[in-house]
Amino acid sequence: MVHCSRRGTEAIVGDIAHGFLYEQGGAAQIAGVLLNTIKNNPDGTFCLNELVRKFRGFDVHEPNTVLVMVENTHNICGGKVLPLDWLEKLAAICREKGAKVHMDGPLCDGVCVGNGSNDNDLNSIIFRAHRLRKALGGGMRQVGFLAAAGLCALDEIVPKLKDDHARTRRVAEAIDQMGSPIFKVDLANLHTNILMVEILSKQVHSSDFAHRLATVVPGEMEAGVVDADGKGIAVKVSARDWTFARIVIYTNITDEDVELAIKKIRYVVAEYEKEL
């Protein structure tokens, strides 16, 4: 809303970006901003030549492109980290076109920095954002609940991110070692704690796979798919109308939890292979 403050403006955003897919069209609903999509590459980037062609506003019939949105890390692309050289080229294009860049994502610390701006520019942006926050309510920010959570994350969680990444890779390697013709992971492009399990068979829907992982049936308990207390194992993954299931390892998941998850995944994968 700060950067698209005039009616008749638009923002360019990736076609599988979080801001386009999952926020109820909030840019249009609340800010009156058109989102113009550009196809995301598997690594979360998009074609910069296509981006240049996407800019509009030279014709009076068109909206004015004033903002380009990127997501880092990129959720649906599997937690991919955007290459710094690509971001620099993107920033150069936007400077030339007179457009701003907005970076969406929880792990952009150290990357999203002011480029070519001065203190007056920054103060102006902060002032406008402050006014808009007031218009939208802003009470939770004032009492500091979200700020406290953010400080806790910076102090306690960031140092543990490497552990989440290592545990995610442990799960990915276990799935890869199964050699399944149905379920596949891309070890070479696993950047963070988001793991995408690609489903190669059209007979298996990702939502069914997710439901099966979260369900405990008597047969698997009899086969020893249980925890140390003899209880069944439920693994929660996310899936919608996708050809993949999404596994995220976060700070509360331990090494023991990871091994239990692998045990359950192995059983379910073998079950699918036997049925198909």
Image (cartoon, rainbow, N blue to C red):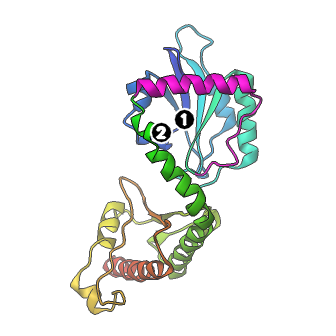
Residue 38 badge: none
Between residues 236 and 139, which one lies in front from this camera angle?
139
Circle 2 or circle 1, nearest the eye: 2
Residue labelled with disc 1: 13
x, y percentage for residue 104?
A: 56, 42
The correct choice, above or below, for 17 with respect to 152 in the image is: above
Residue 192 location (% of width, % of height): 59, 62
Question: Can residue 208 be seen in this snapshot?
Answer: yes
Amino acid at the residue labelled 2: Gly
- Nearest the viewer among 244 and 102 is 102
Circle 2 packing at 10 Å, graded few (<14), some (14-19), many (20+), is many
Screen quadrant of the C terminus: bottom left
Q: Which label is found at residue 19?
A: 2
Q: Secondary structure at mark 1?
A: strand
Q: Is residue 210 above or below residue 79?
A: below
Q: Residue furthest left?
A: 218
Q: In front here: 82 or 57?
A: 82
